Amino acid sequence: MANRGGFSSKLGFIMAAAGSAVGLGNIWGFPYEVGQGGGAAFVVIYLIFCFILCYPVMVTEIAIGRKTQKNPVGAFNDLGYKKWNIVGKMGILSGVLILSFYNVIAGWAFGYILEMAAGNFNIAEQFNTYVLDIFKVGSYGLLFMATTAFVVSKGISGGIERAAKLLMPTLIIMILSLVIYSFTLENSMAGLRFYLVPDFSELTGSVIYNAMGQAFFSLSLGMGALITYGSYVGRNDNIITSAAFITLADVGIALIAGLMIFPLIGYMTAGAMEDVGRGPALIFVTLPQIFGSIGGVLGSIVGTVFFTLLCFAALTSTVSLLEVPVAYVVDELGVRRKRAVWIVAIGIFIVGIPSLLGNGYSDFFTSFITYVGAEKATDFLSFMNHIANDTLLPLGGCLIVFFAAHIWKKHNLDEELSHGSPSYKGSFVQKYLNFAVSYLAPLVLGILFVFTVLSTFFGIKII
Ligand code: PHE
């Protein structure tokens, strides 16, 4: 047990887990989902998911991890329910799939640091050709994966925790300075209005599904990333408060990322929020245009800071994504950590190649699959995203809470949670968690999982 390593303190764990949560999902995904999903109405639904449904899942994952001190597969075995380790296996598969395409996007972001530093704002219009230069963006991706592997190979306290303690505060300083700057621009208030004043007529079924997928993805839930991190947490640490802090940090940074981006868009569109290229392109097309319109050295500095912060956020997340399969290989197959890290990292990089090619370079991967009832084909990267984020994560989350409440049993979960949290037993939080973990979360997540699959892949819209 001793040679598995662990976090050096409660703060170290919180930083690393918050680092896992805060990533492309917050700074790239959240604003684009808000843009696509009707602004503030999406934000409200997202917040409900995070606090009411996802927080209980997070607490459960960390508790299972700490109890067993194992990776997601080993954890189910260790509790004596071998059949259930399929949930852990599904989690590891999700981790592999997510990291494979996440790393491609992180590679693009890394390249943008160089472009912004060189003052090449035209990259915005050239984004479609930029991603076609697969040897260039592929080597950025390789570099990103190698950096991730390097951090993970240094172990828990010496690598993951140390990187998070350095990167997270820097990220917060960068993001806050960009928020302040964006508030000084003309028409920033039009952007803020779009972001903060809800219009519930925009609320549709797919806004709800997207909010659920986004909440799971952003909080790193449903695939055992927090079972794994939980397995390195000290016996006397308080899981209840740590999880609350991680949720608040993640939601807070997503909200702040919105405060940075929507005023910038208001500025560029002179207040006409409709004109904006929303969707995934937001960060790679719209933002560099905005930095270009600021122009000169200032534009270059703002752009470089922005993409550096994006990469820092991504790195603490890729580290946690890689740690999940690595912990599995180390614990279950008995491979040495360093060796496991490099083998798994190379494997995942290879799995990511179709996501790299599917943005126009290869027709096959660009028009990879056409869902039933869809007008257009879906590219490989988006397909991976739909499979992993929108389906496997909520399903995993649903099964994890169901398992904890009804198979492993509530009182065991409560027992684990009360270690390090003396006032837990008998508290309101305990009552709420019992209800959420036993009934609310499995039911709601289960139903929404079915609805999402029907709607995304089969064009059957129930709500
Ligand atoms: N939460 C990370 C982000 O928002 C992504 C992630 C998902 C990391 C699942 C680990 C596990 O970017």
Image (spheres, rainbow, N blue to C red):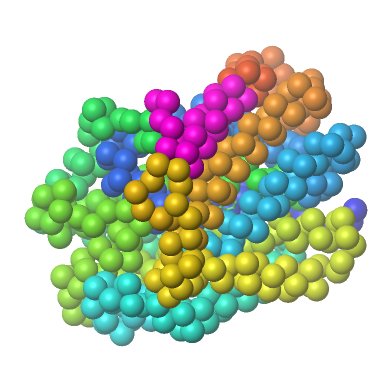
Principal secondary structure, stretch drawn in magenta: helix
In the rendered image, which quarter is residue 111 located in? bottom left
In the shown orientation, is residue 43 left or right of residue 77? left
Q: Quadrant of the C terminus?
A: top left
Against 183, residue 38 (above or below) is: above
Residue 412 quadrant = top right
The front one of 146 and 429 is 146
For residue 125, side relative to residue 232 (left or right):
left
Residue at 48% across, 55% down: 369
Whether residue 58 is visible here, answered yes or no, is no
Q: Is residue 279 above or below residue 39?
A: below
Q: Position of residue 436 (x, y in %)?
A: 60, 21
Pinpoint residue 458: horizontal percent, then vertical percent.
47, 39
In the displayed structure, would residue 350 be above or below residue 392?
A: below
Residue nearest the observer in this picture, 183 or 134: 134
Residue 387 part of the magenta segment: no
Where is residue 1 drawn, in percent x and y? 90, 53
> Does the image show residue 52?
yes
Numbered range of the magenta stretch: 441-463
Q: Position of residue 330 (x, y in %)?
A: 83, 61
| Residue at (22, 34) in percent of width and height | 197
